């Protein structure tokens, strides 16, 4: 199969890698094919094969791999869950695909200090299964948690269901080890402490770095005791902005809300797959309801009960919302969002994408501009022939209303032209976000779609980002083609 | 390059998996837990399937070996909505058609076609009774275990009638020899005709699902008949409580594929066994390591998988694991020995029939 790099170089690198990795390095096209794409919208027959796949088991092995890549100038692409929607692990520049899930050991559980130190290739699901045996959990919980790794969560700065109370991975991270583009293993951060006022906050740089600074091999995370109980409630609202205001009111009242997700009518349909499978019909949603807000509360029973009662009282009496009485609908939504307890043989994700693919413009907006953003979404989706899947607003910052938004569409991936149209839609949604004083991406990252074009958002600071990249990765071997370059969106549309 | 017809049938499922990449099938796949290339998970195989279908990949010995390292346990399918196992089977069939299957699979197929049996140690067993039984290759090679089962049945007023039988041919089809499987079916049916048309009780979950779904026969696993018998009045008087604490391992074919989860558990409870469930149970139970013909091509991998399953049990604080499948019992039993030798962790593997034997012994005339 074709390779974008010189075969001779790859051959030499393979020989050197094989000396210490043995069967954990391969040039086989079959194994490479299995790493040829992620969850990002691409033509259905797209395949970007890496030149080699390696499975390191330790930081030391990763350093040796990086030394060889550095010597031959071969790209390194770290592969975590492979569920990214931004093309972050696509090997469109060729290179060595690092299967990080060989590094999946728990190195230390420190119950006294509530920290856990892990190799970064462990999945969030597996880590939480382990922590649960100690009465603990990591509250960073993306929807891909069955599959996504700690390293990928740091690298992609992905979403978390419980962001409203606990934030995202950055809020749990106390230090991490990275093998940089200079083939050096460096620990960033502040040991087991959650903050530091000394030096620069280089640990924060890793969050959302998408493998462009190095490969994350270890991380220490602050974990917390499992709550005793959790309750989930849903409310119908007449407008998106009104529901966002209502959430802010709950927080200012002093209530502790664990998670808040705001859906438009269309998006609710996507999340009630489990309900439909169980009951064979659509849930009952009043015609006037334009927004559906789901909240979860967790802790001791009497505290949770008080929070639920008071929140319901405020939302119904002050904001004229309606409590969703049908518990099956609320539980079905929660199954789909968090528990991932799908009926056997009927899992939502593949079943919902049999004809077209899930794709999203994941912009962030100021909280008062949701209705405005929504009307642009409807208009731009129509302009670029994208079928509307619906909107969800995630709250990803502790104890304040924020708007990390998935403006999702069904992408026709049967041909290149229709996929290109999707990226035109993403481009114009991103421009709209900047216009409305927001951000182009709030949880997917630049991947291979926004690089270069993102200068529109960052202005002069973009040049500082470039220089930082050079310090970590002078030969540009760490995941090239991402963050600073786009496979899809050019700075100039005529380019 | 040839595009393969068998896979084209599943084109929509293959592309749906490729465009989804959720990976919910991956991390708990028993093979992927040991071999960490994505190719060993279902999600990876679905990309390989696309490569084959589109002519991007050629069938090869390496591909044959990789496809052999699948248990066909159906865990991935339970976590999904696509026909993953059918796709993997279609790929295995293609491997056979291109002349690349493992030699041992070819030999087994030839043996079954020629002799109607899988194992050398199989015995000819005949038994007079009023309930027709299909014993299967595994139990035919294990006289002692089979005697125990028949003894339990008799004590429950079930009188097995056993005649000559030929292998159901599961392993022939599972390893990709689809045409040969048709031949195996003819032979098996001929012997079956002698048993009459009535419902048949089976002892092996794999034979059960094969005879039921591939032959369309009215078969039931014998444990269902036992479950019914134990519901009869006064049965409690005939049971000696075992006072045992154990976990129950759902065999893939009996549980996930035939939906028989509760009956074995209810029997265990009736026998006085406190069941501690493992993390992965019922629909999401994981394979013992013996599925899909793996033991024949990679026993070391099979043993690693077996040990992982036993560690699942250790993880919930039990040292006894009960199952009701001759393959699971053997593979877990061998895994337990290895675990004991390697780490000193001591797990006891029991068959539900043995527990029935212990509990009913002496209390039933």
Image (cartoon, helix red, strand yellow):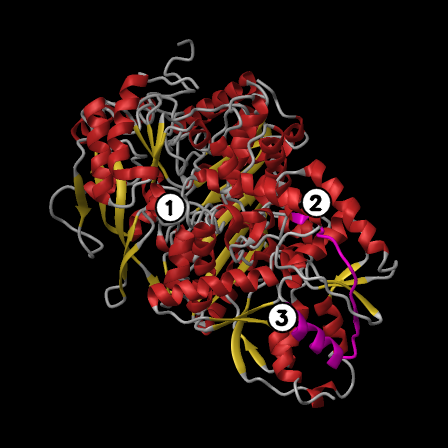
Return the mark for residue B145: 3
Residue A416 or residue A403, whichever sits in front: A416
Is residue A475 among what the camera can see?
no
Mark 2 surroundings: few (<14), some (14-19) or many (≥20) residues within 10 A: few
Q: Quadrant of residue A81?
A: top left
Select label 3 or label 2 by which is in front: 2
What kind of element bears circle 3?
A: helix
Q: Quadrant of the C terminus of chain A?
A: top left
Q: Chain of mark 1?
A: A
Residue at the image position 81 percent from the left and 55 percent from the top: B192
Select label 3 or label 1 by which is in front: 3
Kindly check if marks 3 and 1 are in contact, taking CB atoms under 8 A apart as contact: no
Q: CA distance from mark 3 to mark 1?
A: 45 Å
Q: Which span of residues is magenta-colored?
A: B143-170
Q: Is residue A20 above or below residue B223?
A: above
Return the mark for residue B114: 2
Residue B354 or residue B313, whichever sits in front: B354
Q: Quadrant of residue B54?
A: top right
């Amino acid at each position: 199969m074709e390779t974008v790099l010189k075969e001779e170089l790859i051959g030499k690198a393979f020989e050197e890698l094989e000396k210490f990795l043995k069967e954990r390095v391969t040039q086989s096209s079959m194994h490479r094919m299995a790493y040829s794409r992620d969850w990002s919208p691409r033509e259905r027959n797209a395949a970007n094969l890496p030149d080699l796949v390696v499975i390191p088991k330790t930081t030391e092995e990763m350093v040796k791999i990086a030394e060889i890549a550095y010597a031959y100038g071969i790209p390194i692409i770290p592969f975590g869950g492979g569920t990214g929607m931004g093309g972050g692990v696509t090997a469109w520049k060729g290179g060595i695909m690092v299967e990080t899930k060989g590094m999946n050991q728990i190195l230390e559980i420190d119950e006294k200090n509530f920290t856990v130190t892990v190799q970064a290739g462990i999945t969030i699901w597996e880590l939480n299964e382990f922590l649960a045996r100690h009465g603990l959990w990591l509250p960073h919980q993306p929807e891909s948690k069955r599959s996504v790794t700690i390293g990928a969560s740091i690298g992609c700065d992905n979403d978390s269901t419980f962001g409203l109370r606990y934030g995202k991975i950055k809020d749990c991270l106390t230090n991490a080890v990275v093998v940089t583009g200079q083939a050096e293993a460096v620990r960033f951060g502040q040991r087991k402490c959650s903050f530091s006022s000394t030096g620069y906050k280089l640990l924060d740089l890793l969050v959302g770095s998408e493998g462009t600074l190095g490969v994350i091999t270890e991380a220490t995370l602050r974990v917390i005791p499992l709550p005793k109980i959790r309750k989930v409630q849903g409310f119908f609202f007449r407008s998106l902005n009104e529901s966002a205001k209502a959430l802010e009111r709950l927080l200012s009242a002093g209530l502790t809300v664990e998670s808040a997700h705001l859906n438009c009518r269309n998006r609710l349909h996507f999340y009630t797959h489990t309900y439909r499978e169980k009951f064979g019909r659509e849930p009952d949603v009043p015609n006037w309801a334009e927004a559906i807000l789901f909240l979860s509360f967790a802790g001791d029973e009497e505290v949770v009960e008080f929070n639920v009662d008071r929140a319901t009282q405020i939302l119904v009496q002050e904001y004229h919302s309606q409590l969703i009485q049908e518990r099956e609908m609320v539980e079905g939504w929660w199954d789909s969002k968090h528990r991932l307890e799908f009926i056997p043989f009927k899992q939502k994700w593949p079943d919902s994408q049999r004809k077209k693919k899930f794709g999203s413009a994941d912009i962030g907006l100021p909280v008062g501009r949701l209705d405005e953003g929504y009307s642009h979404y409807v208009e731009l989706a129509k302009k670029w022939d994208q079928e509307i899947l619906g909107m969800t607003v995630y709250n990803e910052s502790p104890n304040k209303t924020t708007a990390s938004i998935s403006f999702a569409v069904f992408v026709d991936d049967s041909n290149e032209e229709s996929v290109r149209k999707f990226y035109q839609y993403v481009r114009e949604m991103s421009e709209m976000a900047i216009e409305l004083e927001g951000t182009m991406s709030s949880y997917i990252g630049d991947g291979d779609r926004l690089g270069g074009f993102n200068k529109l958002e960052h202005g002069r600071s973009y040049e500082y980002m470039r220089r930082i990249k050079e310090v970590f990765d002078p030969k540009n071997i760490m995941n090239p083609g991402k963050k600073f370059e786009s496979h899809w969106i050019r700075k100039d549309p005529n380019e | 390059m040839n595009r393969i017809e068998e896979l084209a049938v599943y084109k929509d499922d293959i592309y749906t998996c490729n465009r989804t990449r959720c990976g919910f099938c991956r991390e708990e796949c028993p093979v992927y837990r040991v071999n960490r290339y994505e190719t060993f998970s279902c999600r990876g195989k679905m990309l390989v399937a696309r490569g084959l279908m589109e002519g991007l990949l050629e069938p090869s010995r390496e591909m044959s070996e990789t496809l052999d390292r699948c248990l066909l346990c159906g865990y991935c399918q339970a976590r999904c909505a696509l026909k993953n196992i059918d796709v993997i089977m279609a790929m295995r069939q293609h491997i056979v058609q291109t002349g690349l299957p493992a030699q041992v699979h070819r030999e087994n197929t030839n043996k079954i076609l020629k002799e109607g049996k899988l194992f050398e140690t199989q015995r000819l067993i005949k038994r007079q009774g009023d309930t027709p039984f299909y014993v299967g290759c595994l139990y035919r090679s294990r006289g002692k275990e089979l005697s125990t089962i028949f003894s339990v049945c008799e004590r429950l007023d079930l009188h097995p009638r056993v005649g000559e039988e030929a292998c159901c041919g599961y392993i022939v089809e599972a390893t990709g020899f689809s045409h040969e499987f048709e031949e195996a079916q003819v032979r098996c049916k001929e012997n079956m005709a002698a048993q009459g048309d009535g419902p048949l009780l089976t002892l092996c979950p794999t034979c059960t699902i094969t005879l039921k779904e591939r032959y369309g026969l009215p078969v039931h696993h014998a444990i269902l008949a036992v479950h019914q018998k134990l519901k009869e009045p006064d049965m409690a008087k005939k049971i000696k409580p075992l006072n045992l604490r154990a976990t129950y391992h759902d065999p893939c074919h009996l549980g996930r594929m035939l939906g028989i989860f509760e009956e074995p558990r209810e029997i265990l409870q009736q026998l006085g066994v406190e069941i501690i469930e493992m993390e992965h149970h019922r629909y999401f139970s994981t394979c013992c390591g013996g599925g899909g013909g793996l033991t024949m091509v990679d026993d070391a991998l099979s043993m690693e998988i077996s040990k992982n399953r036993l560690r699942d049990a250790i993880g919930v604080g039990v040292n006894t694991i009960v199952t009701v499948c001759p393959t699971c019992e053997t593979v877990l039993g061998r895994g337990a020995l290895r675990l004991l030798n390697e780490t000193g962790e001591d797990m006891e593997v029991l068959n539900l029939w043995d527990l029935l034997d212990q509990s009913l012994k002496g209390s039933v005339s």
